Amino acid sequence: MFKNGCISILCSLIFITSCKNHLPVKLIGEAQGTYYMISYYDESNRDFQYEIDSILDEYDTSVSLWVSESIINRVNNNDSSVVIDNYFRDNFIISKQVSIETDGAFDITIEPLVVAWGFGEGGVIDIDTININSILTYVGYDKINLINNRIKKSNPKVQIDFNAIAQGYSVDLILNYLLSKGIENLIVDIGGEVSARGSKLNGEPWKVGIEKPASKADDIRDLTAIIKLVNKSIATSGNYRKYIEKEGRRISHIINPKTGYPSEYNLLSATVIYDNAAFADAYATACMVLGLEKSISFVEAKKGLEAFLIYSTADGQYDSYYSEGFNNLIISNFQVPE
């Protein structure tokens, strides 16, 4: 099970079908501390739920911090005998690439900071006693490398957290499994990270709803837009679903790996569309660390990346930015909340 570092994924899958003679197969279950919803068309109406659950369970044994003997925990505990598997390798390589592209805004070595700020397994701790500068000496993607299927650290205190990418990767994993079984028209949603291929049988595109920012974590989830998703993946990261409160101050789970402190930009949520969900997941988190202006520059410079950013203005109102490509995908656009 994952304790998702960007758990505020805010895309609600909209299952709308209009083909009366051939309904999609729908699978609903739990994985990684969240839900999954999968819909696909198959002439034989095959049910792959057992296989999907098995894949997700196996994946947990590689990259989940919540499985005590997982590969990632063995790496973090400096087990010299551990050899990584393909799941771990893929997450590591993608993470390294995104770290380089975002100049360290995305960084999987953030785990010690996650724990220090109370977002780890131990819950809230007295952060006033934490020496952030000391922790930063062993945080940084350049302090860890993959050599011959083994992880090499520059400091044994370096620890990895894949939570800002692992859920997106799991969507890709299930999507590719179903494609390998000859499924051509499908949509996979795990905790709000979504990938779609093909369309509904009537030719209509798959549709995904994007959630409005909420003032409280348990507020009703209203939509701010509905978009069509055609052979792409979408992920959202936000700072308003997962946070802790200390002495009246809301502390976001989005932590800047360069400063060691939670992000305090006016950017409230970042929804990105890309070719696959793992990269989309990582890019969404990176945007939340970069802040509004740098995120816009990054999105406009990155080929194939589209984004929808919701931010607060100086007068306390909400506003939004759409990249051109994202705007072209919007089917229904509701008013951004004030």
Image (cartoon, helix red, strand yellow):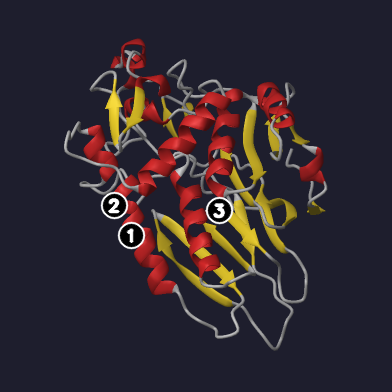
* CB within 8 Å, label 2 to label 3: no
Q: Mark 1 is on which residue type? A: Asp
Q: Badge 3 is on which residue?
A: 192
Residue 328 x %, y %:
83, 48
The span from disc 2 to disc 3 (Cα, nearest Å) is 22 Å
Q: Can residue 179 be seen in this view?
A: yes
- Residue at (25% x, 47% y) in the render: 70
- Residue at (48% x, 61% y) in the render: 174
Secondary structure of residue under mark 1:
helix
Q: Badge 1 is on which residue?
A: 57
The span from disc 3 to disc 1 (Cα, nearest Å) is 19 Å
Residue 61: mark: 2
Residue 317 against residue 88 in the figure, above or below:
above
Residue 110 against residue 336 in the figure, above or below:
above
Secondary structure of residue under mark 3:
loop
| Left or right for 144, reference 224 | left
Residue 295 x %, y %:
66, 27
Residue 292 x %, y %:
67, 25
| Labels 3, 1: front one | 1
* CB within 8 Å, label 1 to label 2: yes
Nearest the viewer among 140 and 226 is 140
Pick whichever of labels 2 and 3 is earlier in the sequence.
2
Nearest the viewer among 296 and 247 is 296
Q: Mark 2 is on which residue type? A: Thr
- Residue at (69% x, 36% y) in the render: 310
Residue 156 against residue 13 in the figure, above or below:
above
